[in-house]
Amino acid sequence: MLELRDFQVRYGNFKAIKNLSFSLPSGDAVGLTGRNGVGKTSTLKGIIGLVETEGEVLFRGEDISDLEPHTRATRGIGYLPQERKVFGQLTLEENLRLVGEDSGEDRIKNEVIDLFPCLKGLFNQKAVNLSGGEQTMVAIARLLIRNPDLLLLDEPTEGLMPELEEVLHRVLEENLRQDRSILIADRNINYLKAISNEVYQLSEGLVSNVIEG
Amino acid sequence: MQMEASWNLGKLLTVFVVVLTVFGVLPLFLGRFQVVLVTEALILGVYALSFDLIFGYAGMLSFGQSIFFGVGAYTILYSFKGGLGLAVSLLLAVFVAGFFGLLVGGAIVRIKGAKFFLVTLVGSILFYLLALDNRWLTGGSDGMVVPTVFPGLAENYYLVLGVSVTAILFALILVRSPLGLVLKMIRDNERRAGLLGYSLKKYKVITFTIGGGIAGLAGGLYAYTSGFVSAGFFHWTRSADAVVWTILGGAGTVVGPFLGAALLTVVSDILSAVVGNIYPVVVGALLVLAVVVFPRGVFGLLEGTIRNWKGDSGG
Amino acid sequence: MSKLAFGLLNGVVWGTVLALLSSGLNVVFGLMGTVNVAHGSLYMFGAYLAWICFSFLDSFWLSLIVSPLAVGLVGVSIGFLLKPVRKDPILTVLGTFGITILLQGSTLVLWGGTPRRVPLPFDSTFSLFGTGYSFYRIFVALVSGLVLYCLWFLVERTKFGLRLRASREDPELSSAIGIPVFNLFLLGFALGGALAGLSGALIAPLVSLTPEMGLRIFAIVFLIVIIGGLGKIWRSVVVAIYFAVFRGLASIFLDSTKGLILTFSLALLVVLVNPSILGRSSANANGS
């Protein structure tokens, strides 16, 4: 599903990721861990195309490293950024409508309520008025709407309540069962081990350790 | 868009003396009309220099230089009318315009980026309208005659040359001084400079004041040599001129604005002989080109070429 | 008293056109923090197109279609041209300023500096306080109002508007979730241009056309947009009307120039005194 070959991320003269090469098959999950600033976010951003990279990023066998982020997204890559990014000025419903198909809006609404019942009355609220946890739920729901084949998650458990962690876990397991792939970055190694087949520890821009999940 | 003049003081002074000599003997070889052009280019070069200090060195895109140009011009007028001599009047022009620079700069210094540009643009328009409206003071668009004893651009060539040289020297010393270095730091990375403890506002206001003073000097010289002032001195197109000359000549270099002013004044004259009014079209196109393709201006290009010839490693 | 009524009415009419123009600037400005100094010149271009339609094609009404379309296209070209520098506010200002000079200069070369006039497309007036008030002005206000309503609907109620608002708020996130931000950026420029062109065409019979009318109005519109809040289209509409009414009234009690001076000074004061108005900074940070 995803393969990185000689993948590098640099900011000006600084190489955040010096060389990363691994493959992530369908139905598998891989974790990226390491201390703050080691390059987990840079890796994910590089895969979705928000930062300049060198080397190859192969998605379903095709090199996407020259494509714009929005093209990569529509091809089936879902990205959940750090800090549960939502569009504060848009309502909850609008945040979801952004990625939804034009028809089937009600179906989507119902699915989201099934998943996160406590979002029920909040659809007309501006996202900036929602609590942190609610915003995370919205971000996760938005990620899932298009059923992306590759999910990129950046510190998804940050500030997440335990019940929601469980919900997320269930959702991720379900996606894996459906042969989708997951790449998670998180500082919490144990969390990653629970869901991933392998966890790569990053240090100084390279993989320093591989832990079986 | 920033060029670090990497020449050491010795090299610089040599070049300077050479150029000065050339300019010194120039009138002997040129016809009167050409001397007029050179004189005008020198004055306008000083004016462009004032903008370069503010923009190329302190990073503020100000559209308000016409304000100080006009203030300087009218100061000369009233100073002469008051019976003061040339030297005193020119100094007065610098100080009064500089004072205005202090006022304006102090008022707007905490504004950033595009909004700063807007405020200076509106300020420029405002001053123009005020000048237009107060005919008793400014003579409106018809203007007033400046009682110059010895008017004429060509006749005052050496005076203008002297003043320009002083201005250039002053600017060169300024940008190499501690103040200049702080300014460059502010221009290149405001946050860092602030974190290092520099009072951004203070330095910006100082630069604005100096820039205002120099623009006033140019305005005074221009009024003096043409023997005439009008509200048009305040018109925003004057501000635009300063911007264009500096950008095309090369911002952040002391010489670039002069090059720009000189080249474009000549180009403007040539073009208007060929097709009336085509000059703005050419300038506009050049500006767009400069911004998108080569932001370092003509001087930047020249410097780059000279570097290549000398075989220096790329900057 | 009738002078007052006229001044007020004129102010409202002028205000709706300014509102239209400001919205156009806001669509682009709010989109990516891109300042389009040429916006005023696009307005000027739209007005001249109206004059051309009238003078050479014998139909003013044609320009109400031609101007938005043509100027919209010019808008897209500008967006395209600025692609490499769109993230740098200073370069964008300089670049669009260059385009302003270019457009202004071209107009000067092609049509000369003498003010051009477009006669009113229809002469009917209605009686107001014993004097005739032109129906055309009412027409202008109505059309502007209608277009503003359509704009509102487009931005707040359609998917396109939704994506536009999202791109405006967070271009990076928008791109990552599948929104073609640059294409929207170009469309925004087209929309902004079309609005400017339409404003110019509408106002053409009411003012005298000169190549300089562009930059002068740009200063006004930019002020309005800043005071109303970047990207806050609807607040700028309100500010535009206030501004125009104030200017109209001031011009009645003082003279035209003094009225403009007063209005500018006041607006400038508002901008200077209230730093929070300058709040919402550019959507993009300076690249370091």
Image (cartoon, coloured by chain):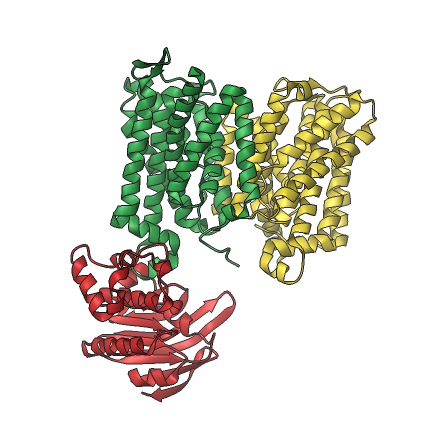
Chain colours: A red, B yellow, C green
Q: Nearer the viewer, residue B119 or A163?
A: A163
* Up/down of C207 relative to A7, above or below: above
Residue C43 placement, left or right of B206: left
Q: Nearer the viewer, residue B52 or B78?
A: B78
Residue C208 placement, left or right of C52: right
Q: Tell me which residue sits at (27%, 68%) in the image.
A: A118
Q: Quadrant of the C terminus of chain B?
A: bottom right
Quarter of the view holding residue C14: top left
Residue B65 placement, left or right of C9: right
Residue B308 placement, left or right of C25: right
Q: Residue B221: horizontal and vertical position, in percent?
A: 73, 29
Q: Nearer the viewer, residue A195 or A134?
A: A134
* Up/down of A194 relative to C234, above or below: below
* Up/down of C182 relative to C22, above or below: below
Quarter of the view holding residue A9: bottom left
Task: List the single residue furthest toward the front.
Answer: C1
Q: Tell me which residue sits at (73%, 22%) in the image.
A: B152
Q: Residue A38: horizontal and vertical position, in percent?
A: 46, 76
Task: List the single residue furthest toward the top.
Answer: C130
* Up/down of A197 relative to C113, above or below: below
- Residue A67 in sight: no
Q: Residue A83: horizontal and vertical position, in percent?
A: 40, 68
- Residue C215 in sight: yes
Task: List the single residue furthest toward the bottom.
Answer: A212
